[in-house]
Amino acid sequence: MASRCRPESPGSPASTYLGVCRTGQLRKRFDAARAAIGMAHVHWHDLRHTYGSWLAQSGHPLTVIRDLMGHSSLAMTSRYSHLAPDHLRAAVASLPGWERAGKKSAGRTARKAA
């Protein structure tokens, strides 16, 4: 009987939250799952990228995404920043008088598009 995946020791990086298998076990299970659903074109890294993308789209800070994904720098994690522009909008919206200026701009943009 195959051994089950088990969590790593406390204090280890992101895999603590997810639980891990030995590399060979994980690879065999992933390959079997891909074959079972007919998606041989899906690779492990595709899932990893989706995980990072969903974290960014959920509004988590890049530092949290970096830590969960095990990136050594924010430069690596910054590839996900374009997926979460809401924090940029919120920062600009917090400026005094921005709400009024934003409505004027939105009206001009709408008229140009029409």
Image (spheres, helix red, strand yellow):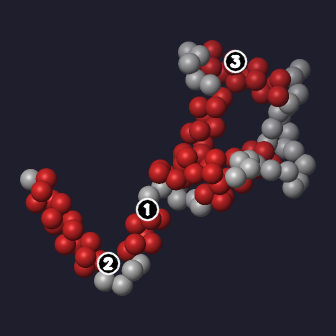
Residue 59 on image: x %, y %? 53, 59
Residue that carries the numbered disc 2 in the rendered image:
98
Residue position marked by numbered label 3 in the rendering: 32
The picture places residue 110, in percent across and down from the top left corner, at 15, 59
Name the amino acid type tagged 1: Asp
* 49 versus 55 height, above or below: above
- The residue at 60%/45% (across/down) is 52
Of badges 2 and 3, the one in the foreground is: 2
Q: Is residue 113 left or right of residue 91?
A: left
Is label 1 or label 3 in front?
Answer: 1
Residue, x 59% and y 31% (percent of image)? 46
Label 2 residue SS = helix
Residue at the spot x=9%, y=53% of the render?
114
Residue sitting nearer the eye, 104 or 4:
104
Q: Position of residue 89 (x, y in %)?
A: 40, 66
User: Can the viewer see residue 55?
Assistant: no
